[in-house]
Image (tube, rainbow, N blue to C red):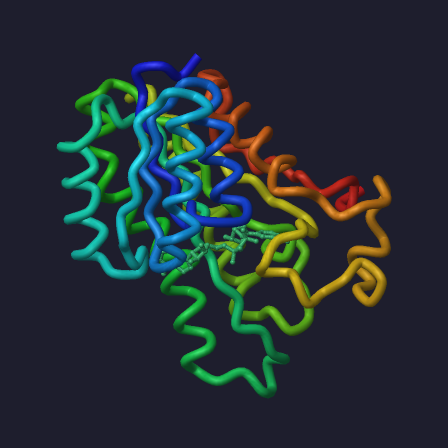
Amino acid sequence: MLKGNTAIVTGGSRGIGAAIAKKLASLGADVALLDIGNEDQAALVCEYCRTEYGVKAAYYSCNVADFEQTKEVVKQVSSDFENVTVLVNNAGITRDGLLMMMNEKQFDDVISVNLKGAFNMIKHCSRMFMKNKCGRIVNISSVSGLNGNPGQANYSASKAGLVGLTKTVAKEFASKNITCNAIAPGFIATEMTAEISAENNPMAAAIPLGRAGTPEDIAGAAAFLVTAPYVTGVVLRVDGGLGM
Ligand code: NAI
């Protein structure tokens, strides 16, 4: 389904990003993982994609918050791979704390990675997508960006910002066969949420489907958006019904 296409997945070394990379590889896409760390985990993901699905896979060390670095890495990926048409902006961090206690650095760091990181990647990929006459952008937002969440002023602002960015990019590039959509995951069991268990988290306990989501739940939604040419500008909640 995606054979002959290359997907860039930021934060693709572990958690949701790794699951998305594997899912897109299972559909035939070559995959380029961009991550600031976790090189060993990234190597395992690449190896898995190559051996299980026979696709090309490579890891690039990159801080998505850095405008120049992302520019260079996108250039490198486009010379190493054929026909880059997919970008999944998944890299994200949390620096939680109630607003009264949150310092400027906590706020700036989260905005830089979660929001500016997506801007950087879209900015540097857009010309290539136009040249390739196709682009499928998926931004990983969060229900925290749609509903707010105490202790996450920085994070929810960054994730709400991604919703605005998604819709504007969708409108600006629609005529070029470039779609841009967002996924708003609910509570997903990954290393990011490892210390929050379903038992002591009121949000997790309130999930109608009765369980935390898995990275594969999000990967399935990402695969849908990447392969849906007539869907653009949407924010797809994948939250076990939390938003009802
Ligand atoms: P994770 O912490 O397991 O993985 C995030 C990956 O992003 C890591 O490999 C990390 O090295 C990478 N990364 C962090 N900063 C980076 C930077 N500056 N440049 C490049 N890569 C960077 O997190 P998880 O849970 O897999 O989350 C993935 C995305 O999903 C994030 O954007 C997160 O905000 C979002 N999300 C997660 C939810 C959850 O419950 N786990 C819920 C809603 C959204």
Percent across and percent down for residue 40 are 39, 53
Residue nearer the viewer, 107 or 216: 216
Q: Quadrant of the C terminus?
A: top right
Residue nearer the viewer, 86 or 35: 35
Look at 17% across and 32% down and name the residue there: 80
187 sits left or right of 48 in the view: right
Percent across and percent down for residue 221 are 59, 30
Look at 23% across and 51% down and name the residue there: 70
Q: Quadrant of residue 48?
A: top left
74 sits left or right of 46 in the view: left
Q: Quadrant of residue 114?
A: bottom left
Q: Is residue 113 visible?
A: yes
Q: In the displayed structure, would residue 17 be above or below residue 230?
A: below
Percent across and percent down for residue 182 are 51, 39
Look at 51% across and 28% down and name the residue there: 23
Percent across and percent down for residue 94 are 53, 66
Look at 32% across and 50% down and name the residue there: 119
Q: Quadrant of the N terminus?
A: top left
133 sits left or right of 187 in the view: left
Q: Is residue 175 visible?
A: no
Q: In the displayed structure, would residue 153 be above or below residue 74?
A: below
